[in-house]
Amino acid sequence: MNYRYLGKSGLQVSELSFGAWVTFGTQIGEDVAHDMMQAALDAGVNFFDNAEAYAGGDAETMMGSVIKKAGWKRSDLVISTKIFWGGEGVNDRGLSRKHIIEGANAALARLQMDYVDLIFAHRPDIHTPIEETVRAFNYLLDQGKAFYWGTSEWSAAQIAEAHGVARELGLVPPLMEQPQYHMFHRQRFEVEYAHLYEEFGMGTTIWSPLASGLLTGKYNKGMPEGTRATLEGYEWLKSRFEDEEARDRIAKVGKLMDIADEIGCTMAQLALAWTLKNPNVSTTITGASRVEQVVENMKAIDYVEKLTPEVMARIEEILDNKPQFPTDFR
């Protein structure tokens, strides 16, 4: 496993990381969760991602229980949570000072930890002034309940505003952003955020690198049973695989699989390795429902060097979706 600095900080995170979304607290039990996290650790993973919204908090409870029972050294781990959706009460969601602090305290209780390494504003909150949000996350940092704070799916303008507020008030700005990034979702990461990497030294912890499974190739012959898209509550995801755009993407995956075969990897490994070719990716968050999937995903590291400029050019030709920087500033 290789490690990258998280933005301009001195914190190093494994290039591939492991997240609890969807599976923890819903699809798997604690024993399987332990075995998957152990497999990730054995591969060199040190970053484990979570959120108060995942399984209504049960994902944090499961991960915290696994870590405590396993007795893993806390300083060897980088643990995150994300705050926005904490419950049904009017003040149980959003980025008010009240919810950020109460939500963080509740997450720490579920994780059975004194602190998390990373804490994210899970989405922008248009109803709360950014100054209030910046001050609240800084309070958590000052209290030692988190070491770094960041954003998830904020616009570049919102991130820049948070930096401006922090600079004006002498506070700590957001260090990292957690955006969706994969072969079919590139514009925001590669274009909108481009100036943020250099201007602010922004780190990234990207999610959905396999496009919710589309980039594994398992949907090439229809909708298999037992996949994420067939789970109750994920009907929105299933619909994404049935429109014309999805059919076009599936056809492209078929062509990409030929490249994967040539370099000796799976389609999933190719897609994961592709994200790591981007130097602005600090870590790529993977997910799984079986230990075997974790082991397979971690092997993607072995194929990054095989994605030569020639191979990357062939991939680009198949994707035919390279984001373009705006040229008309009128």
Image (cartoon, rainbow, N blue to C red):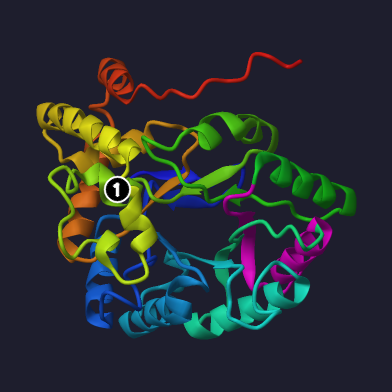
On screen, residue 32 versus residue 59, left or right, reads left
Which quadrant of the structure image shows residue 101?
Answer: bottom right
Judge the density around disc 1: few (<14), some (14-19), many (≥20) Cα neighbours within 10 Å: some
Residue extending farthest right: 168
What percent of the width, then of the height, locates residue 284? 40, 47
What percent of the width, then of the height, locates residue 252? 24, 30
> In this rendering, is residue 111 above or below 311?
below
On screen, residue 38 versus residue 261, left or right, reads right
Amino acid type of the residue that numbered disc 1 sits on in the rendered structure: Phe
Residue under pointer 1: 241
> In this rendering, is residue 149 above or below 205?
below
The one of 317 and 270 positioned closer to us in this rendering: 317
The one of 75 and 85 positioned closer to us in this rendering: 85
The one of 72 and 79 positioned closer to us in this rendering: 79
What percent of the width, then of the height, locates residue 156? 67, 40
What percent of the width, then of the height, locates residue 85? 58, 71
> In this rendering, is residue 86 above or below 117?
below
State the residue at coordinates (23%, 50%). 297
State the residue at coordinates (51%, 32%). 187
State the residue at coordinates (36%, 35%). 183
Instruction: Give the magenta part as a residue range.
Output: 130-154
Residue 27 in magenta stretch: no
* Secondary structure found at label 1: loop
